[in-house]
Image (tube, grey):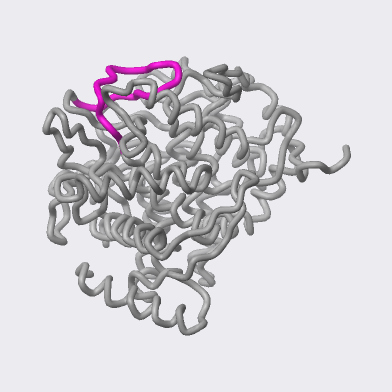
């Protein structure tokens, strides 16, 4: 088991190499252009981001099975290196975890040989041992046996989140076995089957009752499903399916942007892997759209001044004192009560770097002892109610880690977009460089 002290030592060596002139993890301020505005990280910003990534990657390492590579859906944030005794793994968490392996290797957080071995184990298990139907996986499974948790659906979106991690690993690791396993997992997926004769994808399938009635038909995190399907070299759907989901526009306090009535994570997940910067299709520049959505979300939070402030804002699907809920806004969704969810801002780091970093650093500074543990921020907390979630969630840690890395170096974007199927799909649905003719 890798101890946090060991990880820190590996990371310090990486930092020292970088500051001596090597490429990789940098604590040196640099200017980057995001949303058309230059942004320059301070040393304090870089140090915070490095903590967020390093400790988030540790979650995916310690809360993953060395035997299967599956990663728990959630775990306590006060552990000391042991795995949480709960057994429910999430394929979405595992998809984020495969990408976190790439980040951990790039940053020197964990030993390279062990990372490669874990990557092989994960892909071997998902190709040959984890139950699947037409290449799609059940949302939740036992972390060691792979047995489906009762009620778990065969999930189109969670399979897509896993596949994004699979393809990130294929592109990052120069290992023939990893590349072969990843390709077989992707090529096995029968995308037309999940359409179930419709014009949009079903959200899933149950072994007893068949396809779910709900469909991916309104703009949200669904872009990855359509692009993965259109880019498939073995079981593709036609590029025209990209036009079949609606793109409603929300108008809020001067902000106009494409969105469903959904939490802010829907503007983050596909863009953690697919690089939409400087590109648009016939409908939108989706990166800029997510920038606007984040600004609108911050304004929405600040419209509740009894709860939120410049140093305390952000709400997305998460735990709360009453359980788990999908909440946020605009428009207002869920039982809003003043709880804050750090992954709301962390998942938008690449969209609004200065503002998201400012609130995250302020929250860690003020509530760090209660709100920050072994794996970084707890999933959610509500200081006025003296409630601090004991858990972290894999998907919320995942979007935070990936977007922090995209902000720092664009690693996930540049790696994932080396997959020819991903580039081809974007071309097929009409993405062009911003300002290009035609």
332 relative position to 199: left or right: left
**What's the residue at 20%, 72% (across, down)?**
5
Q: Position of residue 85 (x, y in %)?
A: 13, 48
Toward the right, the furthest residue is 437
What is the magenta segment's predominant secondary structure? loop
Q: Position of residue 172 (x, y in %)?
A: 53, 65
Q: Position of residue 224 (x, y in %)?
A: 56, 38
Examine the rendering and report whether any part of residue 111 can be seen.
yes
Q: Quadrant of residue 396?
A: top left
393 relative position to 28: left or right: left
Q: Which residues are magenta?
A: 323-341
Q: Position of residue 103 (x, y in %)?
A: 43, 62
Q: Which quadrant would the N terminus be assigned to in this image?
A: bottom left
**What's the residue at 58%, 20% (across, down)?**
254
Q: Quadrant of residue 392?
A: top left
Q: Is residue 199 above or below residue 121?
A: above
Q: Is residue 205 above or below residue 112?
A: above
Q: Quadrant of residue 50?
A: bottom left
Camera-nearest residue between 140 and 181: 140
Q: Is residue 38 magenta?
A: no
Camera-nearest residue between 16 and 232: 16
**What's the residue at 23%, 74% (across, down)?**
6
**What's the residue at 81%, 42% (across, down)?**
435
Examine the rendering and report whether any part of residue 181 can be seen.
no
Q: Which quadrant would the C terminus be assigned to in this image?
A: top right
179 relative position to 60: left or right: right
Camera-nearest residue between 170 and 33: 33
């Amino acid at each position: 088991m890798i101890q946090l002290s060991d990880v820190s030592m590996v990371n310090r060596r990486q930092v020292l190499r970088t500051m001596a002139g090597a490429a990789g993890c940098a604590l040196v301020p640099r200017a980057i252009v995001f949303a058309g505005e230059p942004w320059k990280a301070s040393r304090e910003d870089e140090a915070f981001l490095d903590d967020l990534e390093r400790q988030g990657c540790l979650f995916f390492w310690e809360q993953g099975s060395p035997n299967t590579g599956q990663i728990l859906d959630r775990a306590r944030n006060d552990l000391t290196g042991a795995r949480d005794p709960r057994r429910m793994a999430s394929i979405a968490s595992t998809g984020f975890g495969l990408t976190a392996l790439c980040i951990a290797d790039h940053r020197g957080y964990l030993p390279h040989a062990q990372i490669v071995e874990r990557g092989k184990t994960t892909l071997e298990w998902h190709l040959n041992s984890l139950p699947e139907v037409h290449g799609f996986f059940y949302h939740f499974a036992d972390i060691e046996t792979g047995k489906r948790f009762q009620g778990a659906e065969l999930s189109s979106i969670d399979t897509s989140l896993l596949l994004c991690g699979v393809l990130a690993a294929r592109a990052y690791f120069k290992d023939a076995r990893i590349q072969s396993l990843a390709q077989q997992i992707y090529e096995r997926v029968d995308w037309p089957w999940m359409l179930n004769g419709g014009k949009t994808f079903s959200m899933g399938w149950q072994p007893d009752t068949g396809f779910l009635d709900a469909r991916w038909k309104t703009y949200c995190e669904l872009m990855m499903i359509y692009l993965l399907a259109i880019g498939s070299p073995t079981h593709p759907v036609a590029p025209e399916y990209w036009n079949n989901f609606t793109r409603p526009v929300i108008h809020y306090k001067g902000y106009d942007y494409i969105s469903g009535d959904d939490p802010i994570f829907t503007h983050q997940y596909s863009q953690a892997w697919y690089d939409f910067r400087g590109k648009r299709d016939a409908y939108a520049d989706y990166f800029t759209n997510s920038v606007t959505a984040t600004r609108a979300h911050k304004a929405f939070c600040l419209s509740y001044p009894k709860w939120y402030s410049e140093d305390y804002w952000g709400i997305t699907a998460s735990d709360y004192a009453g359980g788990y809920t999908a909440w946020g806004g605009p428009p207002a969704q869920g039982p809003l009560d003043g709880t804050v969810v750090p992954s709301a801002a962390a998942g938008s780091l690449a969209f609004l770097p200065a503002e998201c970093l400012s609130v995250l650093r302020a929250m860690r500074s003020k509530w760090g002892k209660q709100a920050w543990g072994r794996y970084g921020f707890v999933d959610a907390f509500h200081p006025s109610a003296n409630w601090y979630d004991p858990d972290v969630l894999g998907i919320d840690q995942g979007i935070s880690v990936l977007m922090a890395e995209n902000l720092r170096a664009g690693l996930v974007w540049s790696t994932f977009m080396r997959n020819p199927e991903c580039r081809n799909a974007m071309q097929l649905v009409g993405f062009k460089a911003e300002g290009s003719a035609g």
